[in-house]
């Protein structure tokens, strides 16, 4: 679990982190934003996840969704990854490495400008793009922490506006159901089972450990037993 969430030097260093975790996380967010936004070609940064939504806890990752200028996309993304690794190394040597997630969920100024120029895009159609599918969840309640042209703010508004749109929720539930059916079919193939009764539920219905497909973070938060604000 420690390797998945972060990295530590020793128990004393981790205890020191826990004693002032919120201030340390806030400082690391500022440091990451300052250094990444200084890279040529980075035109916007959105702070997503629990920190962006104002619900952090000591093991929160720093989730950043970048917006790159089209003509510098590949080079800027490579420089961002190099900066990310340097920050992780520096934080590790401080006693506790906070996770820094800034990778495949990324956009360009050109594609966003074109999408917004056509008015409000169809959110269900946009879910066909894996970046939008996952970003609309991770970016719910997020905030723009750096931008040069207002596109980050516009993107945040759409993430939060559409996340619980009834059509979006229905589409996500349908996709989850299809994925579950595919898993069950694969199990049947591998086990060669002859089904004679109802399917086995690996997690009983109503169990608090069961994930909520209408909001991915809610399910994960239940598993970690931390307080969750349920949007209405």
Image (tube, rainbow, N blue to C red):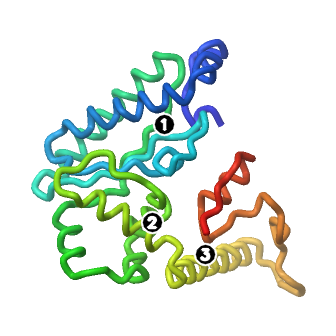
Badge 1 is on which residue?
A: 99
CA neighbours of label 3 inside 10 A, class few (<14), some (14 to 19), many (20+): some
State which mark lies toward you, 2 or 3.
2
Q: Quadrant of residue 132?
A: bottom left
Badge 3 is on which residue?
A: 176
* Residue 105 drawn above or below residue 17: below
**Is 68 positioned to the left or the right of 209 in the image?**
left
* Residue occupying image coordinates x 10% and y 56%: 71
Q: Quadrant of residue 37?
A: top left
Residue 122: x %, y % from top left: 36, 83
* Residue 39 drawn above or below residue 209: above
Alpha-carbon distance for marks 2 and 3?
Answer: 21 Å
Alpha-carbon distance for marks 1 and 3?
Answer: 27 Å
How many marks the image carries: the answer is: 3
Residue 120: x %, y % from top left: 30, 80
Q: Quadrant of residue 202?
A: bottom right
Q: For the C terminus, which image quadrant?
A: bottom right
* Residue occupying image coordinates x 43% and y 39%: 100
Q: Which mark is residue 202?
A: none
Counting residues from the N terminus, which is met first, the one under dot 1 or under dot 3? 1
Badge 2 is on which residue?
A: 160
* Residue occupying image coordinates x 65% and y 18%: 15
């Amino acid at each position: 679990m420690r390797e998945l969430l972060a990295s530590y030097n020793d128990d004393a260093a981790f205890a020191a982190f826990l004693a002032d975790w919120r201030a340390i996380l806030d400082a690391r967010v500022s440091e990451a934003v300052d250094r990444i936004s200084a890279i040529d070609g980075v035109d916007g940064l959105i702070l997503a996840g629990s920190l962006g939504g104002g619900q952090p806890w000591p093991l929160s990752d720093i989730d950043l969704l970048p917006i790159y200028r089209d003509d510098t996309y590949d080079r800027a993304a490579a420089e961002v990854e190099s900066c990310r690794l340097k920050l992780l190394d520096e934080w590790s040597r401080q006693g506790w490495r906070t996770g820094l997630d800034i990778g495949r969920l990324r956009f360009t100024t050109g594609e966003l400008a074109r999408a917004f120029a056509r008015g409000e895009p169809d959110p269900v159609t946009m879910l066909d793009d894996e970046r939008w599918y996952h970003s609309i969840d991770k970016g719910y309640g997020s905030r723009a922490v750096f931008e040069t042209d207002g596109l980050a703010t516009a993107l945040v508004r759409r993430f939060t506006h559409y996340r619980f749109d009834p059509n979006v929720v229905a589409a996500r539930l349908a996709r989850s159901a299809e994925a579950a059916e595919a898993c069950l079919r694969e199990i049947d193939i591998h086990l060669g089972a002859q089904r004679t009764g109802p399917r086995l539920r690996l997690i009983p219905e109503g169990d608090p450990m069961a994930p909520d497909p209408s909001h991915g973070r809610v399910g994960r938060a239940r598993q970690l037993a931390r307080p969750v604000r349920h949007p209405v």
